[in-house]
Amino acid sequence: MAGEEMTVQQLAEMLQYAHGVWVEWFYWVTVIVMFFIHIGFGMYEVGVARRKNVGHTLMKNNMLFALILFTFYLFGWWVYGSFMGPNPINAFIPNYEGNPYVGGDFGPLSPFMTGNLQELPPGFMLAFWAAFLLFAQTEGSIISGGMIERCRISSCVVLAVIVGSFVWIWLAAQGWSNGGWMLKWFGIHDAYASGIIHTIAGFFLLGCLINLGPRIGKFDPQGRPRDIPLHNQWMTAVGLFIIVTGFWGFYFACNVPLIIAWDLTLPYWGTVNIFGNPTTLSLVGTNFLMSLAGGMMGGFTVGRGNPFWTWSGVLMGIIGASSGNDLYHPFQAFIIGFITPFIGYKLHYWVERRFKIDDAVGACAVHGYCGFIGLGIFPGFLLWGYPTGGAYYFGFDYIAGVTTPWGQFASALWEAGWAFAIGFVCSWVLKKAKLLRVEPLVELVGLDMSSPAFGDMYPYFPQLPTDKLPEIDRVQYTEIAKYLGKTRSSRGRFASKDAGRKDYLPPASPKEMLEDAIRLQRKLMGGIK
């Protein structure tokens, strides 16, 4: 009898280790797929930026990826492990001890953050860290796009690290973990991060854009916005579809597959979401596709066939349905996906006109506004009364929360409010230190052309003749001439911190200003005739 019991014990241990290998492999596959998100964001942003800003835009996105990676290992993951807990006070007191892992286990010196073979399952901590890392880098890429063509690389990277390695993960500990207080108090249901990724990034960016200001010439003297054509619509389209491809990994990484399959005393041991609620990967994938289709149709309709808004509608549809796509019926996912682009599109242009916010890629609308309604409105009514927390699957001693309209709205408001406030304050500090935005003439010439590090990213294709430049560029020259004319009354010295050099340019007429800008381009590009 004793021998038979030992055999059962050994079988249980074998199942436990086999489950660990499966979970570790599952998360690393999702991480690989999620890399496509950042390939897509790079192409997407470069496609929107004008030719003279292409290199700067691409390098900005690359560097925030690397720095968030390092800082998220250094302290970002510790934030997640330290600030979760069943009471709001846990949001401000670190090292909550009720977690099966405590805050220190998430730190860079923890044995769990290296090759610890004693962990059960082995490698789980690092695999889970990697999945969250790619979420963190998505936060940085989202805010990067809205600030293109006038923000310094250094300031953009600093803001990306703040949102990617602190703000979102701090709020995730409270509202996107199986032990956070928002689960118990608000009954938050945000299975695929309409709120914790998209709302936070969109509203953090909104706070930054207020201080960054619009691109020169974006608004006419009457305050009406001018259209700034995309540099490459084809590149933007491919970039968006690559982002959507990466979202497959994003969606599946938000689940725990085959949860503790060796414990047959539990009522359920299949796939669960991050809150411990049962779901299936098949339903998740189907709802992802249905919300994608609805979003594309909605974006095409509201944008009247505009390619940019058709492609952006895909993201808006997915984001609008993401909070509840573990439970929605596929028809519900489709309807939400179709409706959401109408709301995001209208809000984008209303905010742009009313508050003079220049969001170059529409990220505040696509991620912020659509994420807010995706978390704060739709699931509150469609999933009203559904028990939110199955936390006992993860070792917690309580089952927390019930989904309600007021709980979902309060959760969205909490996340958006903190994200906006921190984004505004941090960008305001950079603005006061004169580190947020490039000099006006650097913006005129182009962030590539004014820096020896970049130059012309298309050296084998000629620039447009002066008389064939797009309207927005001609307007920019006029606006900068007015700016320099107000600040200097005689010919003076222009110093470009980005270029690392000094050039003597006059605050002259728009035509002379344009000629000087072209001469400066040629000088920086090695004397092109």
Image: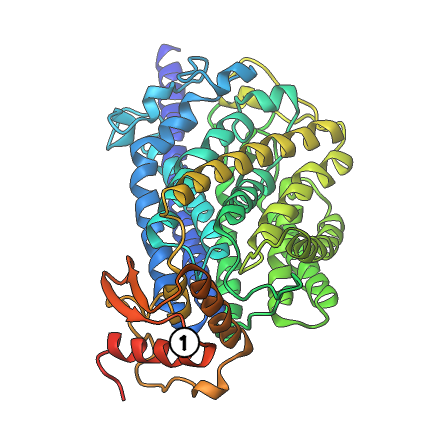
User: Which residue is at the far top?
Assistant: 2
Q: Residue at x 24, y 26 (%)?
A: 109
The relative height of residue 5 versus residue 478 in the rendered view (above or below) is above
Classify residue 313 as left or right of residue 421.
Answer: right
Q: Is residue 326 visible?
A: no
Classify residue 126 as left or right of residue 259.
Answer: left
Q: Is residue 145 visible?
A: yes
| Amino acid on which disc 1 is placed | Met
Under circle 1, the secondary element is helix
The relative height of residue 98 versus residue 337 in the rendered view (above or below) is above
Q: Residue 456 appears in which quarter of the rendering?
A: bottom left
> Where, quadrant-wise, is the C terminus in this rendering?
bottom left
The relative height of residue 118 versus residue 361 in the rendered view (above or below) is above
Q: Residue at x 53, y 25 (%)?
A: 174
Q: Residue 296 appears in which quarter of the rendering?
A: bottom right
Colour basis = rainbow
Q: Residue at x 49, y 74 (%)?
A: 473
Reading the image, the residue beneath label 1 is: 513
> Where, quadrant-wise, is the N terminus in this rendering?
top left
Determine crowd level at label 1: few under 14, some 14-19, many 20+ residues with C-alpha closer than 10 A: many
Q: Closest to the observer: 392 or 140?
A: 140
Give coordinates of residue 510: x percent, y percent: 46, 77
Give coordinates of residue 499: x percent, y percent: 27, 63
Q: Closest to the observer: 421 or 248?
A: 421
Give coordinates of residue 115: x percent, y percent: 24, 33
Q: Closest to the observer: 99 or 417?
A: 417
Give coordinates of residue 158: x percent, y percent: 36, 43
Total residue callouts: 1
User: Which residue is at the far front?
Assistant: 489
